[in-house]
Amino acid sequence: MRRLDFILSKSFTIDDSMSESEQPILEVRDLRQFFPIQEGLLRRVIGYVKAVNGVSFTINQGETLGLVGESGCGKSTLGRAILRLYESTEGEVIFHHQDRQLSVLDLDRPGMRQVRANMQMIFQDPFASLNERMTVLDNVIEPLVCNGIGSRQEQEATAERLLIQVGLRKEHLRRYPHSFSGGQRQRIGIARALSIEPKFVVADEPVFALDVSVQAQILNLMKELQAQLGLSYLFISHDMAVVENISNRIAVMYLGQIVEMGTRDQVFTAPQHPYTRKLIEAVPQPDPVAKRHTFPRLEGEILSPVHALGSGPARVELLDAGDGHLYAAH
């Protein structure tokens, strides 16, 4: 048993049945995010970094989809593109809200404000995501202020309730972020993301900079909040052990494309793609007696997401291994 598994098993467990509904809350259809490569004084475009290249998936209400892959594969770019923090090159993002289907990439500014009240993000770096010049109170209520929700008194009451809900104390509201540890700062970031009561949250490497025991605390907190509030998560991580412990389903991303997707048990017990197998094999195993996953060695050139004009990898075709377990032909 991995150390993170052990810590989590003593407090909170998750199973694939925790997904509350088969009703979708988010659909991503053939999403692409390309960044131009320019050179010379005239900034001539000579190629593109295809950071996200034809990604499609659905997230159901109350579900956690874990998005996993090595650094640089396009995970965080995908999360930001879904929230339209980047203007996508092509594709569709459909958000289901109050019996309506909103095309996120086509909305005007008032429409995006409505959507962002229901779609929020927990950022990767707890030391960079909070404004050091603002108190914890002002950081937490910033989304409420930006959206004109409630009076100042109501905003403060919301912040106090949320801080207690994430395991901090109301007296922390008047302090500044620099006086908190990394784990405490991430709790504040979670409180801020939940302040306007979203239904869907993109969690971008939320435990990346934390030690294992604090990781477990944050993961348990996120699960508890999901159960209480009916949240749906896109949980982004490069750590297979973390993703295994929080996800109902898992999507494996490589060079901007999904190469495998299935339930947690499908992906971990019967991985189909060589890249998925290597990610599982790379998970640290502190028990010297425990049997490790071993798979054949991968050989060949390391590919790049950088492509000249008119070139690039073909779109992957996903095959069905059964029961919705999809994988790319290889």
Image (cartoon, rainbow, N blue to C red):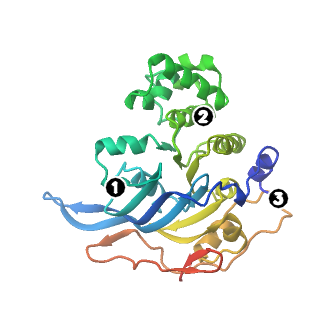
The answer for how far apart the CA atoms under marks 1 and 3 are is 47 Å
In the image, is residue 6 above or below residue 52? above
Q: Is residue 182 left or right of residue 25?
A: right
User: Do labels 2 and 3 touch, CB within 8 Å?
Assistant: no
Residue 184 visible to an observer of this rendering: yes
What residue do we see at 62% from left, 69% from top?
262
Image mark count:
3
Farthest residue in the front direction?
99
Which of label 2 and label 3 is nearer to you?
A: 2
Question: Disc 1 marks which residue?
Answer: 105
Residue type at mark 3 is Asp
Res 187 label: 2
Q: Where, quadrant-wise, is the N terminus in this rendering?
A: bottom right
Q: Quadrant of residue 245?
A: bottom right
Q: Quadrant of residue 17?
A: bottom right
Which of these two is toward me, 289 or 193?
Answer: 193
Q: Where, quadrant-wise, is the C terminus in this rendering?
A: bottom right
What residue do we see at 59% from left, 29% from top?
162
Tag 1 secondary structure = helix
Res 287 label: 3
Q: Earlier in the sequence, mark 2 or mark 1?
A: 1
- Determine crowd level at label 3: few under 14, some 14-19, many 20+ residues with C-alpha closer than 10 A: few
Tag 3 secondary structure = loop
Q: Earlier in the sequence, mark 2 or mark 3?
A: 2
Residue type at mark 1 is Leu
Residue 327: x, y in percent?
57, 76
